[in-house]
Amino acid sequence: MTKNVSPEMKSFLNDLWGAEGNFIDTPIGRGRIESVRTKAGIDLEVMVSVEEALIMNYRDVDGFALFSGTELAAEHGIRS
């Protein structure tokens, strides 16, 4: 079965793929993209350095937080 992906989501995920070192708004604040890797299906996993992660213990690994690409897209108002 093929999942339909909106052009906006496809563009966002393509841009995210090469975005290491860039800054991005996340559900817990602005952070620097440290790494991007593939996940099952069309999604990506993004590790973001966010200072607020230490305070909020939001999937925290020493100040890093993990997000899915689709979760970050939703934060930017993009739906698949």
Image: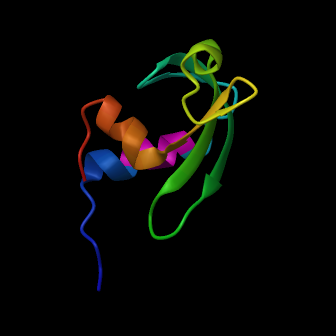
| Residue 44: in magenta span | no
Q: Is residue 10 above or below residue 16?
A: below
Q: Quadrant of residue 54?
A: top right
Quarter holding the N terminus is bottom left
Residue 23 or residue 66, whichever sits in front: 66
Q: Is residue 42 above or below residue 7?
A: below
Give the residue displayed 29% in from the left and 80% down from the top: 2
Tell which residue pokes out farthest to the bottom in this image: 1
User: What is the basis of the colouring in this image?
Assistant: rainbow
Q: Quadrant of residue 3?
A: bottom left
Which is the main secondary structure of the residues drawn in magenta? Answer: helix
Q: Which residues are magenta?
A: 11-16
Q: Position of residue 4 (x, y in %)?
A: 24, 68
Residue 53 or residue 45, whichever sits in front: 53
Q: Is residue 27 above or below residue 13?
A: above
Give the residue displayed 32% in from the left and 48% down from the top: 9
Q: Quadrant of residue 66?
A: top right
Q: Is residue 33 above or below residue 1?
A: above
Q: Position of residue 40 (x, y in %)?
A: 52, 69
Give the residue displayed 27% in from the left and 52% down from the top: 7
| Residue 15: in magenta span | yes
All told, the count of numbered labels is 0
Give the residue displayed 39% in from the left and 42% down from the top: 71
Q: Position of residue 55 (x, y in %)?
A: 60, 14
Tell which residue pokes out farthest to the right in this image: 62
